[in-house]
Image: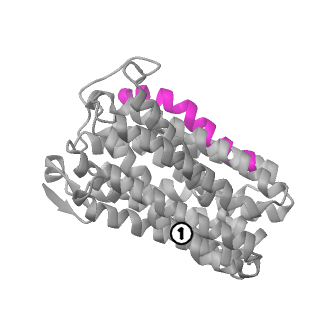
């Protein structure tokens, strides 16, 4: 097995030594466009657009993801992994190029819908490449954490970059920051055009994916755990800057920079996990991270309710949660994906993407109610409830996960 940076690829990598870079950039790009939601909410809320409208904005991203994920397997099978990825990246790059020149609110809805559709294609393609070249559970978890770590870098980059732009004398031109995402997208397309990617042998002409074998109790529990993990992540990624600004009364620049530290801790968490995961049981490591999140949220809730005069310390406590939250999704995914047959991996990934998007949409609508009614004291308790659900569901899943699909 050969090593390329943070990534480890088996024999395919020997023929394609540059495959790691475009995969890394693909996750970086989708991370930036998906997680700019917090910036958009923060900026548009200052233009007298209500929180209930902004809460539904995320649905324009998530619903297309959920719907198109069901058809993406057939799309990818028809055109191939490489062409599908290039198509998705070209569409993201082109739309991001035009975004700064459009002033109407409805274009954000259209833009997020296109981004969501492209993400459905991109994630299925990337997960398929990883699964088709990894067989051992812990090696897959190690690779998954390494690849997903670049997703955290995207969150950090978009928050930091836009934070500096918004706070500068050119703050009114903040939307032009999306042009940099466009350039990275076109560069990634160029990299993909120069390499060959092994395509899966199985082809499908089905309109809807074959869902046979996905009704087992372990799989249902897995999707339930994934649902609440995404629920928790989006509570931070999309709404933490607005929480900092509205509840802790910090300016937009500091709100975005403080949120960037959450991404930095999350990147650290996934990088550390990719280095040490071989030494631990996946289930025990997962439950340890969950317990640490619960511990931190209890401290945060106590500070909010009983020491409200010291709530500024929350600016430093919330980011630490990323250290333990970030490994959850890759670890639980890799544990289940290692049990899935290779010819079913694209279908399985499409279901992961669909469930994730539904979770994100429901969370955004419900959390917007907290903001609209100015009851942000319950923000940490709201997240804590979801973490407790993860702990209960994950415990049940790990007790049953010895079955192989």
Q: Is residue 370 above or below residue 159?
A: above
Pick the quarter of the image with the C terminus: top left
Q: Does the magenta stretch mainly form a helix, a strand or a loop? A: helix
Q: How many marks?
A: 1
Residue 327 position in % (x across, y down): 41, 57
Residue at 60% x, 65% y: name it. 298
Left/right placement of residue 226 relative to residue 342 reads right
* Residue 234 visible at all: yes
Residue range of the region highlighted in magenta in the rendering: 55-78
- Is residue 185 in the magenta section? no
The answer to whether residue 75 is magenta is yes
Tell me the quarter of the picture where residue 359 sits: top right
**Residue 159 image point, x, y percent:** 58, 69
**Residue 337: horizontal and vertical position, in percent?**
32, 39
Q: Nearer the viewer, residue 153 or 395?
A: 395
Q: At x 55% / y 45%, what residue is drawn?
A: 389
Res. 268 image quadrant? bottom left
Q: Nearer the viewer, residue 228 or 27?
A: 228
Task: Say left or right for 129 vs 313.
Answer: left
Residue 170 in the image, given as x and y percentages of width and height: 70, 78
């Amino acid at each position: 097995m050969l090593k390329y940076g943070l990534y480890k690829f088996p024999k395919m990598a020997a023929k394609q030594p540059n495959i790691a870079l475009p995969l890394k950039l693909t996750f970086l790009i989708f991370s930036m466009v998906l997680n700019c939601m917090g910036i958009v909410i923060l900026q548009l809320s200052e233009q007298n657009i209500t929180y209930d409208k902004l809460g539904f904005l995320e649905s324009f991203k998530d619903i297309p993801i959920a719907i198109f994920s069901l058809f993406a397997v057939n799309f990818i099978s028809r055109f191939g992994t490489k062409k599908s990825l290039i198509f998705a990246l070209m569409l993201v790059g082109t739309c991001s190029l035009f975004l700064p020149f459009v002033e109407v609110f409805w274009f954000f809805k259209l833009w997020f819908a296109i981004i969501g559709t492209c993400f459905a294609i991109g994630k299925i393609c990337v997960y398929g490449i990883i699964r088709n070249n990894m067989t051992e559970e812990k090696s897959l978890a190690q690779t998954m954490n390494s690849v997903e770590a670049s997703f955290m870098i995207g969150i950090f980059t978009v928050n930091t970059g836009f934070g500096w732009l918004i706070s500068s004398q050119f703050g009114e031109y903040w939307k032009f920051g999306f042009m940099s995402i466009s350039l990275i997208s076109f560069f990634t397309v160029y990299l993909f055009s120069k390499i060959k990617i092994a395509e899966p042998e199985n082809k499908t002409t089905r309109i809807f994916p074959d869902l046979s074998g996905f009704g087992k109790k372990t799989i249902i529990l897995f999707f339930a755990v994934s649902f609440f993990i995404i629920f928790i992540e989006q509570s931070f990624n999309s709404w933490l800057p607005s929480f900092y600004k509205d509840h802790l009364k910090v300016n937009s620049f500091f709100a975005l920079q403080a949120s960037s530290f959450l991404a930095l801790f999350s990147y650290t968490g996934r990088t550390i996990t990719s280095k040490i995961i071989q030494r631990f049981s996946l289930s025990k490591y997962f439950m340890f991270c969950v317990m640490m999140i619960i511990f931190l949220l209890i401290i945060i809730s106590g500070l909010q309710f009983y020491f409200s005069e010291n709530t500024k310390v929350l600016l430093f406590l919330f980011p630490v949660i990323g250290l333990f939250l970030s490994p959850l999704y890759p670890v639980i995914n890799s544990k289940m994906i290692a049990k899935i047959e290779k010819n079913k991996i694209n279908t399985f990934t499409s279901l992961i993407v669909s469930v994730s998007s539904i979770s994100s949409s429901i969370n955004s609508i419900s959390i917007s109610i907290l903001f609209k009614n100015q009851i942000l004291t319950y923000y940490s308790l709201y997240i804590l409830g979801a973490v407790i659900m993860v702990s209960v569901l994950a415990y049940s899943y790990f007790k049953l996960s010895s079955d192989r699909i």
